[in-house]
Amino acid sequence: MRKLLLASLALLVTAASASAAEVVVYSARIEQLIKPLFDAYTKETGVQVKFVTDKEGPLMARLKAEGKNTPADLLITVDAGNLWQASDQGLLRPVESRILEANIPAHLRDPGKEWFGLSVRARTLVYNKNRVKAGELSTYEDLASPKWKDRLCLRTSKKVYNQSLVAMLIGEHGEPKTETMVRGWVDNLATAPFPDDTKALEAVAAGLCDVTLVNTYYFGRLMQKKPNLPLAIFWPNQNTGAGNAGVHVNVSGAGVTRYAKHPEEAIRLLEWLSSDKAQNLYADMNMEYPANPAIKPDPLVASWGSFKPNLINVAEAGRLQVRAVKLMDRAGYK
Ligand code: FE
């Protein structure tokens, strides 16, 4: 009898710890974007997801300061430049997962397996339809040509998005050619760089300049609010042949922390985030593109047309970030 009691107690304890399975996430993506996903995950698996949201800088500093004592199992942030930094600072661990490797294309994940893209953001051209014909646009490089003199608006070079873009351009073309291009962009600026993509879009809509370079979800958000703005998306570098490697893309993504207390649970959650159901939810909520190519974008996003993405590995954004920042500084890109 006593033996039986002990056995059932042991069962109870196992059941209790199983139902208390949890995973702790540090997220640089806002609660509004991640909570619906975590709720769906908990509903499906019973695993509780605890999370903290903050900007990527403070979250990474916190992970670093906490070291082995960190409660965090998974770090979620935007931009491969940031994910690369987290890896470079030793905050992540490599993950072997056939599921992740099957679901996420190779150019959207760390070759060292420490982070994986979960959504794709395309950094493309947006122009004023009243002032530019689509046929006048062609490539990122062409925005440096004199025909765009005083017609270009850009976001500040201080934002990681532009640092990553220039880093990937260095990876693609080398430094001298990229510097010539960036100097050309600066020469063509109609006005000083803007603090965010939305302000750059509004300047184009207002006729302050004719074309800019932004992540498409900012275009989507602005057009939802003000559908009559004379703005349109253009996909550059789409032709075949040299110099037409496609639209520059970046990711939001995640990695399992080096000192995760629940590494298995963290990997399961990461795998689930790359799966059909999560990919639909995650990309649609922010008007991004699913990283998993089997999943279609939201109909509104799809209405902007399909494009050939540049297949350069997004890890280049981190590896070449310091060189990109110095190059932009030399070129006078503020
Ligand atoms: Fe953004």
Image (cartoon, rainbow, N blue to C red):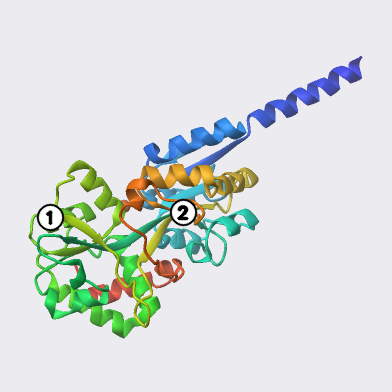
- Indicate the position of residue 104 as horizontal and vertical percent values: 53, 58
- Image location (x, y in percent) of residue 287: 35, 48
Q: Residue at x 18, y 62 (%)?
A: 127
Tally of marks: 2
Residue 193 sits above or below residue 176 on the image: above
Local SS, label 2: strand
Residue with the most extreme bottom position: 176
State the CA–CA distance, disc 2 to disc 1.
31 Å
Q: Pick the quarter of the image with the C terminus.
A: bottom left
In the displayed orientation, state which residue is furthest to the top: 1
Kind of residue at disc 2: Gly
Q: Which mark is residue 223?
A: none
Q: Nearer the viewer, residue 35 or 122?
A: 122
**Label 2 CA crowd tier, 10 Å (few <14, some 14–19, many 20+):** many
Q: 275 left or right of 55?
A: right
Residue 94 picture location, percent across and down:
60, 59
- Helix, strand or loop for disc 1: helix
Disc 1 marks a residue whose amino acid type is: Ala
Residue 332 seen: no
Is residue 249 something that shows in the picture?
yes
Front in this rendered view, residue 210 or 64: 210
Tell me residue 203's x, y (percent).
12, 56
* Nearer-the-camera pick, 81 or 150: 150
Task: Determine whether the beta carbon of the residue marked 1 sits less than 8 angstroms from the nearest atom of ligand 1.
Answer: no
Give the vertical position of 257 relative to 39 (above or below).
below
Depth check, mark 2 against mark 1: the one in front is: 1
Q: Quadrant of the N terminus?
A: top right
> Can you tell which quarter of the image residue 42 is in?
top right
Q: Residue at x 7, y 59 (%)?
A: 207
Q: Which residue corresponds to mark 1?
A: 205
Is 22 left, or right, of 25 in this rendering? right
User: Circle 2 sits on which residue?
Assistant: 253
